[in-house]
Image (cartoon, rainbow, N blue to C red):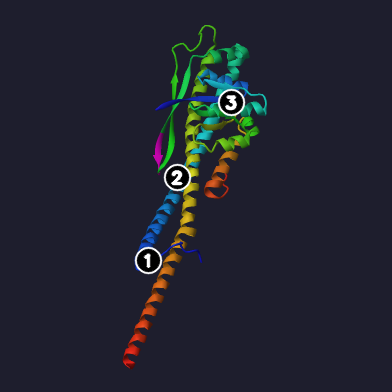
Amino acid sequence: MVSDKIAIIGDRDTVTGFRMVGVQESSVPNNVNEIRKALLDYFRDPRMGLIIITEPLAMQVEDTILELSEAPVPVILLIPDREGSTGAYETVLRELIRRAVGIEINV
Amino acid sequence: MSKILAGTKTTRMELLRLKNRMRLAERGHNLLKEKRDSLIMEFFNAIAEIKEARNVVEDTLSEAFSSLTQAKMVMGPSRVIEFAYASKVRTDISIATRSMMGVRVPVMTVEQHVPELPYSLPDSSARLDTMSIKFREALKSLTKLAEIESTVKRLALEIERTKRRVSALETIVIPRLDATARFVRLALEEREREDFIRLKMIRDRMDMD
């Protein structure tokens, strides 16, 4: 049983909230390059178990996320930010389903 | 007609061996097909679970955000951020794996170490406590969702792999074995006929003498 770290990439509010409950790694990127860099940094950390990223930021680096999602660990999880869900996670999921079953299914 | 296996000898032994391989391939094919079907069933179950977990996450998160806003209103944004970064709560997740139809799927559990006094009580508002609790709940539901999502991901990969194996057996291995067996059988029959004719000719010649 290895305990792993959690990382959060998001806007100031989201990060603040999760820092409060003990998420150790966090980053508040301001542009696309910073998002990608933060994502890759956390991804390469061997002790990382879960990367949480907010949907608006995830949309900007969708290709990178799809690529990194191939690896089983760490898990990359998209969450809605305070504005509510944008449905970005569905894109990632639908792509997976399309490849697995061969048809498009609405989730 | 698919290609026959190179270097096949046309002997009875070889024919028997080919038949055995064929049986094995067919059995494997059936097993893999069953595996694929039940994987797909599991996959759809997991997808339904995702939907539920998503809803829970969205609810707990929006509650958490509204309590964050309240905390910010009472204490001021910069103080909340200050407290958040100084918070002594530690959260780790442990990932164990369990096997689901031969696919290793993760089981995540959150470990939260909450000290008696996570932050200075006199300086913080009760809103901060509420916010802390809400976000802890949100994190728990997030972990659950992450677990299911990565299960789905791994199932999807496994389904892909199984499908590829099934179709490789179906379209390449089995037809090729079939063609080779047929080739050997025909060659053996041909040789039998030749022998038969040869015997006949020898008998005729012996009769003439």
Labels 2, 3: one chain: no
Residue B52 at x, y = what percent?
Answer: 50, 36
Q: Give the amino acid type for the residue marked by disc 3 in the picture.
A: Ile
Secondary structure of the residue carrying tag 3 is strand
Q: Residue B184 lies in magenta, yes or no?
A: no
Task: Please name the residue that numbered disc 3 is placed on.
Answer: A9
Q: Which label number is shown at residue B15?
A: 1
Task: Please name the residue that numbered disc 2 is placed on.
Answer: B42
Q: Alpha-carbon distance for marks 1 and 2?
A: 41 Å
- Residue located at (40% from left, 43% from top): B102
Can residue B108 be seen in this snapshot? yes
Image quadrant of residue B124?
top right
Q: Magenta region: which residues?
A: B97-101
Residue A71 at x, y = what percent?
Answer: 51, 36
The answer to whether B175 appears left or right of B208 in the picture is right
Q: Give the amino acid type for the residue marked by disc 2 in the picture.
A: Glu
User: For the view shown, which residue lies furthest in the right direction?
Assistant: A31
The foreground one among A92 and B124 is A92
The foreground one among A82 and B154 is B154
